[in-house]
Amino acid sequence: MIHLFEILAILISAVACVWIFRKLNLPAILAYLVAGTLVGEHGLNLSGTTLDYEHFAELGIVFLLFTLGLEFSLPKLLAMRHLVMGVGSRQVIFSLLLFMLISVLLGYSIEVALVIGGILALSSTAIVIKQLNQSGSIKRKSGQISVSILLFQDIAVVPLLIVIPFLSADNDSSMALALLFALFKGITVVALLLGVGKWLLPRLFYQVAQVRTDELFVLTTLLVTLMAAALTQFFGLSMALGAFLAGMMLGESQYKHQLEADIRPFRDILMGLFFVTVGMKLNPALLYSSPLIIAIVLVTFMTLKIFIIYFLAVRAGESKKDAWASAFMLAQMGEFGFVLISLSFSVGILDYELTSILLGSGIISMAVTPYMIKNARKWAVALAFNGNQQTTQNDSNNETSLKLENHVVICGFGRVGQTVSRFLKREGITFVAIDIDPIRVQESRDAGEHVLFGSARQDEVLEAAKIDKAKLVVISYGSSEQSLDVVQKVRRISSSVGILVRTRNDDALKTLLEAGANEVVPESLEGSLMLVSQVLNLTGIPFAKIIRLIKKERKNHYNQLHGFYPGVDTDMSAETIERIEFVHAILLTDNAWAIGRTIQELELTNRRVDILAVRRNDDEIVNLTEDFVLKAQDTVVLQGKPRRVERIERLLQEGA
């Protein structure tokens, strides 16, 4: 019961803070930090100490690094090795040595100075990657520089975690031997993961995808991520490193976008919990007792990191604009820095006062990071401006060359989708298809078709198909429920793109149109129209008149074709009874309530039922006006949902 109360306190605080901060157009990360401070031991102390939140929250970083790995295949990582091993390694070494020197000059011992240098040299992978993904800047050059540096920082955490316990006064073990052993374990586990990921994981997901079960795909994604993280942790390495390697191995597979969509809900929730746990460590009293010290530490280490990263990036051949932008993005303290602070405090290297100062300045640096990332590009352009805009123009040209524009997105690449694609290809119209069938995707890709593997119900998959730049989306699924879900997702991403939906029948025609579809083509009704056109043609009706009739019926959304007479084989299950429309004939008895009343008095339009015709004395009257008066023994032909038709039948016979 205590556990439940603590969890509820955290959730209520997080929900309230996120809602308030989003209303104020402030980043959610800042809201999580504030929520953690409120419920933490230095705030209202509602979180208690019975639950170990930190280990659970670390899974958020694991899932974040897995999704990051999906964006970086091995060839891409090798192509970026000059950034990872060049800029990234130098940034960690230079920053660590500089902060060590400053700490020694301030009177701290070599051991304490080494710990401080390691803590301040790291940046926040969680915040930076999350903000870059949200802003779309991760594919820019500045984003790639930032990610490269963060990757090396995550690797550098491993030796720091090994070294710190050996720095304590009561440890006599050999540090050099431990580092050599850690290096051997690191090479072994990386080679193992790369081998498994290259040969086993694609085959595993191929078999899982063939089952066509969303739950199994999600479970397998979670299992692979956590197993890779557990393997690296077992060898004494970072869990995040294992998850990144697993994601990187799957980054080139056709399942990339679906994997990212599956892992995102877990990643976002656990990342929120991680930032809550970071906020729990902040003691607000420090802001009152030592504000000047915290401000000096904060400004000093952020400013120095900005200049170090800028200098190293420019030396590596990057443009000044991208170097400044990356530097602003990586100025904060990282989440692994908090891990190092906690470890150093537990082994007695850092005292309480220094720990509190580092925690306070680190959390505040995290809090201002979303604002810095949002404005990094603007500040970088201003600082790097040299009188011409050539670099900016080159960036925009490179960016647009990677994007599709005015193309058609086909959701579902079965027979209907493929037929549509052939005519588009014949007319030279660019298209991208989305399909969940792994065999079909592989076959079509081998033939050179542009097909993404994944579910069109996932926002990430739709965004990968550049929905916001498309001119038309064709949804070719037979299931109305699936089509409706996709229509809503597409309309949420883009309010202007055209949406054409194919359905098997007219069950959900109105619903799809109301959800945002521009046109709905019921397969059964279109088949009926084609059959009707052939029948009329063979009976001697002029072809021009047939074309006019067909066009009129399509323009009126198949009004004359809705509804049918039910039979023994009609599906009357609860799932379909509210979607289908019946045509039902009602004979007005001599004492029926509707006798002598006009159609207008019945108010059938408000009751969402239509009168198709009235039969009187063997004559069928179709063109009914509102002042048409019903008589005894008239047969009224109604069209509408079964339950509505039943209500109208009682109304006509018995009255309201």
Image: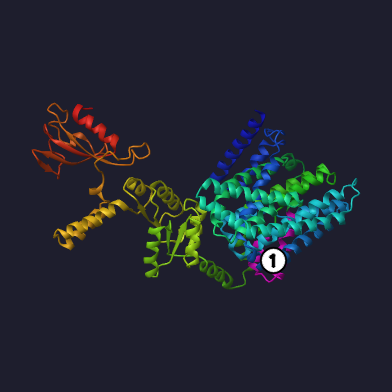
10 Å neighbourhood of mark 1: few (<14), some, or many (≥20)? many
Q: Is residue 616 above or below residue 147?
A: above
User: Could you tell me the amino acid type at mark 1?
Assistant: Leu
Helix, strand, or loop for circle 1?
Answer: helix
Query: Which residue was labeled with disc 1?
Result: 83
Which residue: 76% across, 54% down? Answer: 157
Q: How many marks?
A: 1
In the picture provided, is 405 more to the left or to the right than 58? Answer: left
Q: Is residue 619 above or below residue 440?
A: above
Which residue: 45% across, 60% down? Answer: 433
Please provide percent x and percent y for residue 498: 38, 57
In the picture provided, is 614 more to the left or to the right than 18? Answer: left
Q: Relative to the observer, which residue lies in front, 627 or 166?
A: 166
> Is there any visible trace of residue 158 in the rendered image?
yes
In the picture provided, is 372 more to the left or to the right than 652? Answer: right
Q: Is residue 305 inside the magenta stretch?
A: yes
Query: Which quadrant of the view contains residue 391?
Result: bottom right
Please provide percent x and percent y for residue 95: 77, 59
Which stretch did the figure color magenta? 299-327
Q: Quadrant of the C terminus?
A: top left
Q: Relative to the observer, which residue lies in front, 509 or 183?
A: 183
Dominant secondary structure of the residues highlighted in magenta in the image: helix
Query: Which quadrant of the view contains residue 470?
Result: bottom left
Which residue appears farthest toward the left when viewing the image? 617
Please provide percent x and percent y for residue 643: 29, 34
Q: Is residue 301 inside the magenta stretch?
A: yes
